[in-house]
Image: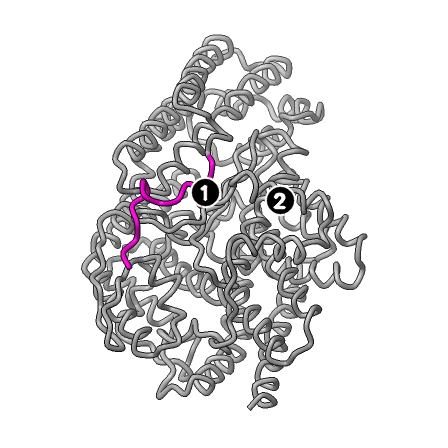
Amino acid sequence: MELAKRKDVPVELTWDLSAIYADEAILQADMEKIRNLTDEIERDYKGKLNSVETIQSCLNKHRQLKEIQELTRSYCYLSASVDFNDAALQERESGMRRLFAQVDSRLSFIDSEIISLDETVIREAIAQGGPNQPYLEDLLRQKPYRLQPETERVLAALSPTLNAPYKIYNMAKLADIRFPSFQAAGQEHPLGYSLFEDSYEYDPRTEVRREAFKTFYKKLREYENVTAAAYQATVQQEKIIATQRGFDSVFDSLLFPQKVDRNLYNRQIDLIMEKLAPHMRKYARLLQKIHGLDRMTYADLKLTVDPEYDPTITIEASEQYVLDGLSILGEDYQEMIRSAYKERWVDFVENVGKSTGAFCSSPYGTHSFILLSWHNRMSDVISLSHELGHAGHFRLCNNAQSVYGTRSSSYFIEAPSTMNELLMSHYLLKTNDDKRFRRWVLGCIVGKTYYHNFVTHLLEAAYQREVYRIVDAGGGVQAETLNRLMKETLQKFWGDAVEIPEGAELTWMRQHHYYLGLYSYTYSAGLTIATQVCKRIENEGQAAVDDWKRTLAAGGTKTPLELAQMAGVDISTDAPLLDTIETIGGYIDEICRLTEELE
C-alpha cells in the first residue's frame, strides 16, 4: 500500500500547530516583531555594553527576542518536517533561517562586547543572578575561544550556508530518493524509508526482511557519493572552525557545548564496545536459534524474541497504557499525558515526505510537539513514552528557567526519555507473571530500549569517532572511506556472531545525527543515567522521584556531572556504566533461561 500525501491524511492523526500560531497572519506579525526588536537592540545597545546595568538591560530585551524566535523557528520547522515535498513549506522554513541568520549577525555584537570586558564586570553581572545568569555564565566559558567581533558577525551571517549540508542530506533522503517495490513471498511490497525502518526490519518473514534490506541498500548506494560530499563538508567545516577558535582538537570543540571532556566521551564508547559486545553476541545467537535462521545477518538483528506474541495496540488504547506505565511520576505528569492526547501534541500519521524516526520539539512558551509514525505495535507505545520523556523534561525546565537556562547538555538530554522507556517496561513486568509475557517485555527492554541506545547509536558513535580522527589529523573522507569505517565498526562489535552482508556498510547514510556534532554517543550516556535513577526510584520511591523532578527542572543551569549528582548518580567514575552493562547482560540471560523453559 502506497503512503498517502499529506493533504489526504486524517487531520485527527496529525499535530495541531495552531497552539503556536492560529494562522499565517499571526506568524508574520511575530516575524515583524523580530525585525523590530533587532532594530531596537542594535540601535540602543551597540557600542554601549560597558556596564553591568546596560548588559542586563540589553539581555532583557534580547531574551524577549529569543522567546519569539523559539516559536517562529519551531512552527516553520515542524510544518516543513511533515512534508518535504511541499515547496512552499520548505521555502518558508528556509526564509525563516535566512532572517534568523541576519538577526544573529546583526546582534553578534552582544556577545563580542560583553566578552571583551574585564572578567570582573561579567562576574559582577553573574552575581546578580536572575534570568540572564545562565547566558552570562556560558559567555564567560566561551571567552577563551571567541573570535574577533567582525569574524563572529560574518560567521553568524553565513549560518544558512554553513547549515546547507544538513539541508542537502535531508532533501536527498526525504524528497529525492524513490525506492522501488520488491518481490518476496509471492507478493509485491512497497518500500520507503519509514516502511523499511519501522516495518520491514522487524518482519518475521526472512525472505521479505532480507529482500527489503537488499533493495533498500541498493537504492541508497546510488546516492552514496552526494551524501558523502554533504557529510565531508560538515566535518571539514567543524574542523576548520575548531582550529580557528583555538581548540586543540575538533573533539574538544564539539564536546565544549556539552560541558564534558574527552574522558567521558571515550569511556562511553570504549567500555560498551568491549564489555557489551559479548552480551549482544549472545543475544544475536539466541535470535538465530528462535527464528531457525540458516545464518544470523545484520538484516536480522531487529527481530523480536517472540514475534507471534507481539501485541498490537491502537492509538486510542495507548493513552491508558501510557498513563498507567508512567503513573509513578505523579498526577502532574499524568495530566501532561492527557493533554498530549486531547490537544493533539502528537503527529501519529504516516505520509509521503514526512521526516523519519521520532522526535520531540519543545518551544519555549508553549507545549511540546511529537513526531512519530504509528504502526499499532506495542513498540510504538515505548517510542511515544520516550518522546513524552522529553516533553516532561522541558515542561519542568521551561517553567522553572528563563529561555536562557532551558537547554540541558546533550550528554544528559536522552536521560529523561529513556527513563520513561524503562519505567514503562518495568511497570509491565510487575503486572503479569506469565513467563511468555515476561520474556516479551524483557525482549522489548533489550531489543528496543537498550539495543536502540546502547547498540545502534553507540555503533554510530564508534564509527563517527574514527571519521573525526581522520579529519583531526588533516585528512578527508569519501564514500569509500566511510563505507570501510562503518563495516569495520560493525564487524568489531558483532564478531563472528553476525554476518555483515553487502549494503550494511552504507548504514552511515541513514542517520542525521552526524550533522549534529557528537550526539550519537549521548543516547547511551543518557540511558546510563536513566538506568541508575530508575533503580533508585524502584528502591527508594517518592524521594527519588522528587530528586529526579528537581534535576529535570534545573535544565541547562547545571553540567551533566552536576545533574547526575542531583539525581543520585556519580558519573565521574565508570561504575554506573559498568553496572548498566551488567544489567543488560542479566536481562539477556533471563531471556535465554525463559526461552529454554518455554520450549
Mark 2, residue position = 338
Quadrant the N terminus occupies: bottom left
Distance from disc 1 to disc 2, alpha carbons, whole Å, reads: 15 Å
**Image location (x, y in percent) of residue 9:** 36, 45
Identity, as a three-letter code, of the amino acid under mark 1: Glu
Please say whether residue 65 is visible from this viewpoint: yes
Quadrant the C terminus occupies: bottom right
Q: Nearer the viewer, residue 239 or 327?
A: 327
Q: Secondary structure at mark 2?
A: helix
Q: Secondary structure at mark 1?
A: helix
Task: Decide whether residue 556 is among the magenta residues.
Answer: no
Identity, as a three-letter code, of the amino acid under mark 2: Arg
How packed is label 1: few (under 14 Cα within 10 Å), some, or many (20 or more)?
few
Mark 1, residue position = 12
How packed is label 2: few (under 14 Cα within 10 Å), some, or many (20 or more)?
some
Indicate whether 576 appears above or below 502: above
Q: Residue furthest left?
A: 222
Q: Residue at x 46, y 20 (%)?
A: 109
Please say whether residue 253 is visible from this viewpoint: no
Bounds of the magenta span?
1-16
Q: Residue at x 21, y 52 (%)?
A: 226
Q: Which mark is residue 192?
A: none
Which quarter of the picture shows residue 105?
Answer: top left
Task: Decide whether residue 9 is among the magenta residues.
Answer: yes
Which quarter of the picture shows residue 203?
Answer: bottom left
**Image location (x, y in percent) of residue 488:** 35, 72
